[in-house]
Every structure is written in C-alpha cells, then in structure tokens.
Amino acid sequence: MLSKQKRHPMDKRNCLEIGNKAELLLILSLYQRGHKIYKATDKQDKYKHIDIFVTFSGTNDETTIQVKSKGKTPEHLVCLQIRGFREGLKGSLFGSKAEWFAIERQDCFVLIKTKLLQEFVKKSKYKDFTHDKEEAQTTKKIYVRPTKGGEDHLVYVSVNEMKTSLSHQIVKKVDQQFGIELK
C-alpha cells in the first residue's frame, strides 16, 4: 500500500505521486528478484524516513530503505533534504533511520548505505546558501526552499560522484505493466 500522507501545501508538482511511483517501482523490482518487502507505516515514513522494509532472499536479515525519486531533478543529480521545515528537524538525509537510500535513476535504483551518504555530504562542504534552485544545482550551495511552515535546506549531489566514491549496489527497474527489466 502506498503512502496515505497528505500533499504538502506547497507541492505544485505532484511530488507525492512521483515519490509513490518510485517506491512502487523499487518494490516491484525487489519482489521480482525474490526479496520479501513490506511498506513502512505512514508514521515510520514521516518521522523515521523509512519507506520500505526488505529481507533479501537467502538471508533472514531485515533492512530498511528510504527511496529518493528522480522527480524533476536533472538525471545526473539527486536532491537531498538536510534540514526539514519544522523547527529542529534534521531533514530526510540526517534524520533518516533507514539503513539504505535508494536513489532512483532512469533505468535503475542506486542503493547506498545511509551513513556513507551522510559522510559524503558532510565532506562535500556545502556552505553558502541560495534561494535560486538552478544556482544550487550547479554549485555546492545549499538551496533554501520556502515552505508554508518555514524553510527546507536541500543539496543537489552528483550521482556519478557518489557512485565513484561510495560503495553501492544497483537494482535494475522492472516495467510496471509486464514485470520485465527496462533497458
């Protein structure tokens, strides 16, 4: 079952539906490979930033995944929230209790351990702030996004830099209608 969360009042671009679709694609992709999956509760999603629980085939170890959809971000980047709009919230990157981040790309998901991704972002030295999204996408500046309840802080990170620097796994997407891998 996909998220029942309410749409954020500032969401004008169907982010909730785009995120739900990415979660569904990852669930289908993992299921097709024989892994056991169940969806996190809305409370776990909202407060722990956990989208999916997975037990990989051949193991009894359960792990957790936070899914980041590609949304409308350029294909070579991923947008990560480092501070939430509610006072004191760490954002989905530093507030996540998930063991893995699954970063959606055109034909696959890149799975990276959350702790490795957090360290990578810290070492990347995002310092200055900007209210210009395009500037944030081309520099190492923190994008300050206004929200109804305050502001979010987001960083745009190169997926290729992450894949080159960090240990990761690739999960090929399946076609939703036919259950076959996309090329």
Image (cartoon, rainbow, N blue to C red):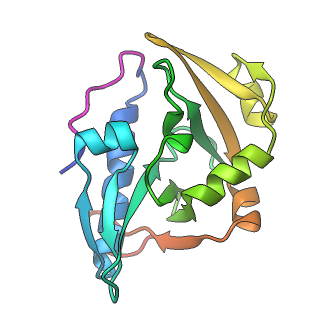
Magenta-colored stretch includes residue 63: no
Q: Is residue 165 above or below residue 24?
A: below
Range of magenta residues? 4-10
> Residue sitting at 41 percent across and 75 percent down?
181
Magenta-colored stretch includes residue 8: yes
Residue at the bottom extreme of this rendering: 58
Q: Position of residue 183 (x, y in %)?
A: 50, 72
> Which of these two is toward me, 117 or 139?
117
Residue at the left extreme of this rendering: 1
> Residue sitting at 69 percent across and 64 percent down?
163
Q: Position of residue 83 (x, y in %)?
A: 57, 29
Kindly report the secondary structure that dominates the magenta region of the rendered protein. loop
Q: Is residue 4 left or right of residue 102?
A: left
Residue 104 visible in the current orientation: yes
Q: Is residue 135 above or below residue 173?
A: above
Residue 178 visible in the current orientation: no
> Residue sitting at 38 percent across and 43 percent down?
48
Task: Name the quadrant containing residue 32.
Answer: bottom left
Q: Position of residue 91 (x, y in %)?
A: 52, 34
Q: Is residue 52 left or right of residue 101?
A: left
Task: Name the quadrant containing residue 117.
Answer: bottom right
> Residue sitting at 49 percent across and 28 percent down?
89
Q: Is residue 138 left or right of residue 74?
A: right
> Which of these two is toward me, 103 or 112?
112
Q: Position of residue 173 (x, y in %)?
A: 43, 67
Q: Is residue 118 above or below residue 132?
A: below
> Which of these two is toward me, 150 or 70?
150
Residue at the front extreme of this rendering: 88
